Image (cartoon, grey):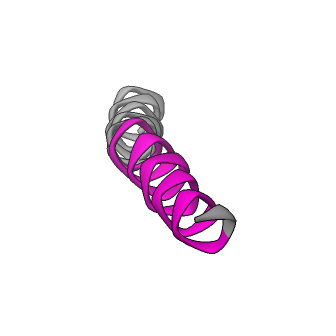
C-alpha cells in the first residue's frame, strides 16, 4: 500500500509544481502589464 501512496503524493506534487510554474510567471506578467498601463 505504501508504494501507491508515494506515487499518488508524487503525482500530486508534480501537478501542483506544474501549475505553479505556469501561473506564477503568468500572474507576474499580467501584473506588470497592468502596472505599466497605470503608469502611462
Where residue 21 sits: x, y (%)? 40, 35
> What residue lies at 67% left-to-right and 63% top-to-bottom?
39
Q: Closest to the observer: 19 or 11?
A: 19
* Left or right of 6 in this view: 14: left
Residue at position x 52%, y 69% in the image: 37
Q: Main secondary structure of the magenta part?
A: helix
Q: Where is residue 11 drawn, in percent x and y?
A: 32, 39
Q: Nearer the viewer, residue 2 or 7?
A: 7
Residue 33 at x, y percent in the picture: 46, 59
Q: Where is residue 28 shown, x and y percent of the image?
A: 54, 48
Quarter of the rendering containing residue 36: bottom right
| Residue occupying the point 44% across, 40% down | 25
Quadrant containing the C terminus in the rendered view = bottom right
Q: How many marks?
A: 0
Quadrant position of the N terminus in the picture: top left
Please tell me whether residue 24 belongs to the stretch shown in magenta: yes
Single out the residue that lies furthest toward the front: 40
Q: Which residues are magenta?
A: 19-38
Residue 34 in magenta stretch: yes
Amino acid at each position: 500500500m505504501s508504494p501507491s501512496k508515494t506515487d499518488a503524493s508524487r503525482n500530486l506534487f508534480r501537478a501542483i509544481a506544474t501549475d505553479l510554474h505556469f501561473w506564477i510567471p503568468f500572474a507576474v506578467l499580467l501584473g506588470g502589464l497592468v502596472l505599466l498601463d497605470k503608469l502611462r
